[in-house]
Image (cartoon, rainbow, N blue to C red):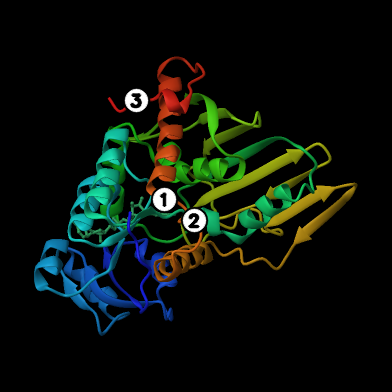
Amino acid sequence: MTFTPFDRPVRAAFVGLGRIYDLNVCGYLANPDVEVVALVDPSEERRTQRRADWPEAQVFASAAELAASGLAVDAVEALLPAPLHVKGVDELLGYGWHVNLQKPMCNDLAGAQRMIDAAVEHDRVLRVMENYLFYEPLRRLKATVDAGELGEVSGYHLKMVGSGNGGWDVPWSSFEWQFQQMRNGRGIMVFDDGWHKLSTALWLFGPVREVRAWIGVTEMGPGVAIDAPSTIVWEHANGIRGVWDITLAPDLYLRSDYYTNDERWEITGTKGFARVNRCTARGIQQPSLEVYADGEMRSFHALDDDWASSFRDSGRHWLGWLRTGDGPLLWCAEEATAVLRFALAAYASNDHGGIGVDPSSIDAT
Ligand SMILES: NC(=O)c1ccc[n+]([C@@H]2O[C@H](COP(=O)([O-])OP(=O)(O)OC[C@H]3O[C@@H](n4cnc5c(N)ncnc54)[C@H](O)[C@@H]3O)[C@@H](O)[C@H]2O)c1
């Protein structure tokens, strides 16, 4: 790819102005690297609502209308419903725009390949943003491990509890495409939100060589089956093992400014452990990172542990990258495909009674 960094602010468009726009916009506000020139959504209500943030921007009901308008755009923030990602990204890259896409990248390897091919064909950058890699407590967790403060890593544990009580409002239209994903075997716990957990595993400890999964199902109503309780274990190529338990607690009240998702990461080393106590919601309201080693517990009380900050920093990273080309994209399309393979290996394992599956053995059929 022949990418040349922009020597002026990036002209950007938001495509999709729904729930997660509220956080993605954080990277764009008061950012001299960008000029928001267009807002796109078929919903008039959303266009009217978001227009207040960007009075100078033009609004459109579709990306095709924006492209036909002749307005110059360099890059788009693609905040589309997940089932539209493949077709949508293909279209956006085809207009000659760089794309910052939301997770999950797509549901299968054929879709991922189609996106990568489109990026190559149109000589544009496709990033699949991963805001968790910008969450300061997780960054400090990684730095603690990488500095050897825990000794050699012995193993680690991720925990995720989904609750339906508390947090911000999620519009019914967002649930509708999530239900569609569930019916297509891509559940909200393992695949949608779980995408982030698998991402952090790859980011912390590198490629995975074997995955074993036991994915459960809880019927919440007609056509609504949540993919929990679930347990997924894996071994990285470096021998480190991870285990992730996913539990449903529908009536558990969870204080949250965002989604009601109680999350933890705990890494054990030969001489200590470190734990991130929360992320999206305010489950354990203690220091967001605790590190125990050599008989002493260190508690981190002053980290920027608001989940929204991870979106802000991920967005700034992307726009900064477009201005400089420096550093990793976090994630590039190929790295995001590795996350997809990880998830697909979990499904393949579950389908075969929990046998070990190598993510690299998953093929595109
Ligand atoms: N990074 C995270 O932690 C995180 C959290 C939540 C959602 N997401 C992801 O963000 C994406 C959007 O999720 P959401 O919760 O905002 O969904 P949403 O349903 O609230 O919003 C989607 C918006 O896209 C609009 N839309 C539909 N078709 C369109 C089209 N063809 N062109 C332009 N706009 C179109 C809809 O009208 C809606 O306003 C999904 O991929 C989701 O998985 C990521």
Q: Residues within 10 Å of mark 3 (few under 14, many from 20)?
A: few
Residue at disc 2, secondary structure: loop
Side (left or right) of 28 relative to 13: right
Q: CA distance from mark 3 to mark 1?
A: 20 Å
Extreme residue in the bottom direction = 56
Marks 3 and 2 in Cβ contact (< 8 Å): no
Q: Residue 39 sits in which quadrant?
A: bottom left
Q: Residue at x 46, y 69 (%)?
A: 316
Question: Which quadrant: the C terminus?
Answer: top left
Q: Of callouts 3 and 1, which one flags the residue occurring earlier in the amino acid sequence?
A: 1
Q: Which residue is mark 1?
A: 332
Residue 167 place in picture, x, y as percent: 47, 59
Q: Of callouts 3 and 2, which one flags the residue occurring earlier in the amino acid sequence?
A: 2
Q: Give the residue type at disc 3.
A: Asp
Residue 262 showing in the rendered view = yes
Residue at disc 1, secondary structure: loop
Q: Which residue is mark 2?
A: 328
Marks 2 and 1 in Cβ contact (< 8 Å): yes
Residue 283 place in picture, x, y as percent: 61, 53
Q: CA distance from mark 3 to mark 2?
A: 26 Å
Ligand 1 quadrant assignment: bottom left
Question: Which quadrant: the N terminus?
Answer: bottom left
Q: Is 292 or 45 nearer to us in this picture?
A: 292
Q: Residue at x 41, y 22 (%)?
A: 348
Residue 58 place in picture, x, y as percent: 19, 78
Q: Residues within 10 Å of mark 2 (few under 14, many from 20)?
A: few
Which label sits on residue 363? 3
- Closer to the eye: label 3 or 2: 2
Q: Residues within 10 Å of mark 1 (few under 14, many from 20)?
A: some
Q: CA distance from mark 2 to mark 1?
A: 8 Å
Q: Give the residue type at disc 2.
A: Pro
